[in-house]
Amino acid sequence: MNNFNYYTPTKVYFGKGSEKNLVKLIKDGNYKKVLFHYGKGSIKKIGLYDFIINELKSNNIDFIELGGVEANPKLSLVEQGVKLAKENNIDFILAAGGGSVIDSAKSIAAGYFVDKSPWVFNSGEQVLNKSLPVGVILTLSAAGSEMSNSCVITNDYTNDKRGFGSDHNRPLFAICNPEFTYTVSKYQTACGIVDIMMHTLERTISYDTTYNPLTDNIAYGLIKAILEIGKVAYNEPTNYDARATLMWASSLSHNGLTACGRDYIMPVHQMEHALSGTYDSVAHGAGLAVLWPAWAQLAAQKDPTRFAELGYQSFGLNRKIKPLDAAITAIQLMKDYFKSIGMPLTLKELNVKYEDLEKIARLYTFDGKRTIDDIILVDYNTCLQILKNCYE
Amino acid sequence: MNNFNYYTPTKVYFGKGSEKNLVKLIKDGNYKKVLFHYGKGSIKKIGLYDFIINELKSNNIDFIELGGVEANPKLSLVEQGVKLAKENNIDFILAAGGGSVIDSAKSIAAGYFVDKSPWVFNSGEQVLNKSLPVGVILTLSAAGSEMSNSCVITNDYTNDKRGFGSDHNRPLFAICNPEFTYTVSKYQTACGIVDIMMHTLERTISYDTTYNPLTDNIAYGLIKAILEIGKVAYNEPTNYDARATLMWASSLSHNGLTACGRDYIMPVHQMEHALSGTYDSVAHGAGLAVLWPAWAQLAAQKDPTRFAELGYQSFGLNRKIKPLDAAITAIQLMKDYFKSIGMPLTLKELNVKYEDLEKIARLYTFDGKRTIDDIILVDYNTCLQILKNCYE
């Protein structure tokens, strides 16, 4: 087992009615003025917006609002939020929504204490040392930002999408009521399922083959649980246990637990960023569903061991099946699963043009200057090959 | 899935050399005066005592010492610690040792802000609202106190042993270097293995049969990992990966993770407290190794489902085996495992006198006035039956 640090200070309030803790949590922190941050209206549809406004007003908690966060949250709105926060002496940010809203809130929180744009943290120019506290009411099971240290922002001036990690990004609390996800569309539910699985799979199946049965069992067990309930959540949107399992898996899959003692790079997440950076219409989860099997098929040829473990532990394959066969079967079963929840299996289904594959490969490899060395080394040519392999 | 709260703010620094973070962690908190708390000399044997003293002195960190914590940490020493801490304006407690030292430190930390004995928190007379920060350097994989909210103290004036839970009990940081457990004896290693397993098993196999595949998979996966590496740690005391897995399992097994969304009572832990409360010579893990199978054999007759899951998921039993058969097999396999790591299987092996069984049953049931209703309802008679069943 490799050395690791583990730090997940977020207070999680999970379950039906957990939003009733909101006022207490804000009052416990003695916060004076709240910035209530949200997206494009889904919280209004489910009554959460009215609930929050009513709770804040009737408990005399001073607040201002900033809505309008889009998928792939934009720096321009973040900068607007920082300005608002500074002008109003905000000391607490409440994010109600999914990963985009939470990341936008984290970025505003980070920008509060600096004179520059908070993009300096995403670009790596500056290290984050202090941030406003962020509280979350979660409405989408996917990104895991509600407990994670990461913050991904799209710089809409330069069209650059970048994430950075810092323990200062970890929310103070996360209110997780699975009922708030009942109205999430089938497609978005499926995208979330893939994203959650990939957060664990890309940590677990990496170049690092250190013996680590505890973290492995947790990771493969998490994948197994999602395989079991993901389809239920997809087919029965108001199945509480399925929605709840998905929501808790979202947090555990990205808070660090499934990587304790294991090093990883997340090569496919990075490739997907190049894909959805080129095609704004591509949902992150859908992009991952296409790219991961294509990457895995190449990687399993080099070292099938950990893909085989996925087969044995998560898909229940017989251990008598040889590693390479088990690996290939597991990857195929994963594709079948993605298909069963309406995910695309090819770039063509995502309306990607064949002539753009080179552009994506260039973006991934910084114009051919970068290689990513995980189980397989991916340079420009290998990346292009992977993209072609899953084109149609 | 039931509602739950999850809060694990402890910063974990895990692995070889992780003790090098000590000074930075104390300086980050800007603490002025440290109470260095430890046990009866094992930290001197492994060089940790000298390391800590040298780190504190050479970095000009002001500190006082209080050693001498025994297994089943005593209130009288805690009270001495509170007095010392108050007289010296201590603002941080460093606990170097296992669960006893950590719990003793937690109790001193709790007592610092009250005028009474900190026993008021264990007795339930008062709720803990504030505590000094406690940092841990762990030297024993067992109790999981390094991340847990619990604090068990023995009142040596009244011979009463009681624990209480509070988030204020959760340590600020835990430095976990598995190498510090290399010298732990085979017997203590085995006791730790049982304790760790039981922290998860008593959460997982409870009266609450709510559908909860994610938490279940994590729990059974944790047990499976311990079954695999426990024997290795027992037979090869300096096997790093085995010691590391055991250490991390100790923390995860008692920090709340394996009970998210599942309610539990821990009936066997409570029975063991009555046993070791009557026989101070009985090690907690050894007592659990005797009592759990005896309780489980009765409970499985009433509802074998979750014992069977233990068989399928942790012991790899074929799912074609019917639940009751799988349950009985799983319990027997667990007994076999305990035996293989030198644990007792009977009360007689623990030198318990047959005529004391009634006394233990009376202690467990508060003189027959209390019943514990888990999978089976345990009253005085059932408790006595369980004790007799595992007597010899």
Image: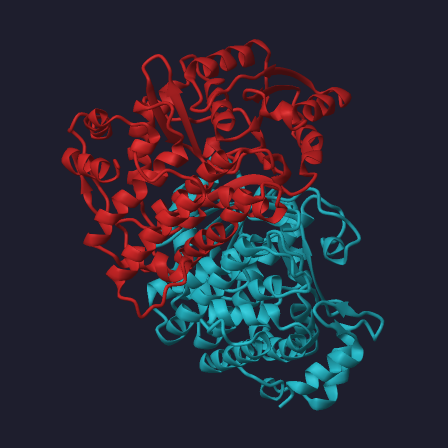
Chain colours: A red, B cyan
The residue positioned 61% from the left and 61% from the top of the image is B203
The residue positioned 76% from the left and 23% from the top of the image is A59
Q: Position of residue B72 (x, y in %)?
A: 62, 67
Task: Check the image and report above or below for A41 versus A229.
Answer: above
Q: Quadrant of residue A279?
A: top left
Foreground pick, A291 / B196: A291
Task: Check the image and report above or below for B255 versus B86.
Answer: below
In this picture, residue A56 sits left or right of residue A220: right
Q: Would you say residue B170 is visible in this rendering?
A: yes
Q: Quadrant of residue A1?
A: bottom left
Task: Check the image and report above or below for A92 versus A28.
Answer: above
Q: Position of residue A183 (x, y in %)?
A: 59, 33
Q: Would you say residue A306 is visible in this rendering?
A: no
In this picture, residue A86 sits left or right of residue A292: right
Residue furthest to the top: A87
Circle count? 0
Image quarter hosting the C terminus of chain B: bottom right
The residue positioned 45% from the left and 79% from the top of the image is B341
In this picture, residue A299 sits left or right of residue A170: left
Q: Quadrant of residue B356?
A: bottom right
In this picture, residue A285 sits left or right of residue A94: left
Foreground pick, A36 / B286: A36
The residue positioned 33% from the left and 22% from the top of the image is A123
Task: Check the image and report above or below for B362 versus A73.
Answer: below
Q: Position of residue B194 (x, y in %)?
A: 53, 71
Q: Position of residue A133 (x, y in %)?
A: 55, 27
